[in-house]
Image (tube, rainbow, N blue to C red):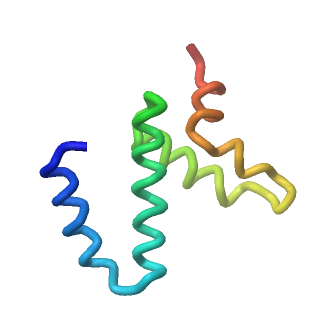
Amino acid sequence: MRLCAAAHNRKNWLFSQTPSGAQASAAIYSLIETAKVNGLSPYEYLQFVFETLPTLGEDDDLGTLLPWRWKDTLPV
């Protein structure tokens, strides 16, 4: 991570008004960075997650939404 990116992200945390807001921000940032590491477009990956998540039942495996598992289902 570049130094200026780290400083920018640190300033973003100032806008988390509550601990739950900070946890939500951390979860989204983690998903975005993990998608990048796995060679995925963060926008397309998050779009897939937000469209698929509401359709999953209680017995469905949330692990299927993880970037490294989703990457394997993409057409070559």
As drawn, the residue found furthest toward the top would be: 76
Foreground residue, 2 or 24?
A: 2
Q: Is residue 10 above or below residue 20?
A: above
Q: Is residue 32 left or right of residue 64?
A: left
Image location (x, y in percent) of residue 70: 62, 34
Q: Is residue 15 above or below residue 2?
A: below
As drawn, the residue found furthest toward the right would be: 59
State the residue at coordinates (40%, 74%).
Answer: 22
Image location (x, y in percent) of residue 44: 45, 39
Q: In this view, does 53 lie above or below 14?
A: above
What is the quadrant of the N terminus in the image? top left
Q: Quadrant of residue 68?
A: top right
State the residue at coordinates (48%, 31%).
Answer: 38
As drawn, the residue found furthest toward the bottom would be: 18
State the residue at coordinates (65%, 27%).
Answer: 73
Q: Is residue 47 left or right of residue 33?
A: right
Image location (x, y in percent) of residue 62: 72, 51
State the residue at coordinates (72%, 56%).
Answer: 55
Q: In this view, does 57 lie to the left or right of 27?
A: right
How many dots with numbers? 0
Q: In which quarter of the image is residue 19?
A: bottom left
Q: In this view, does 22 lie to the left or right of 49?
A: left
What is the quadrant of the C terminus in the image? top right
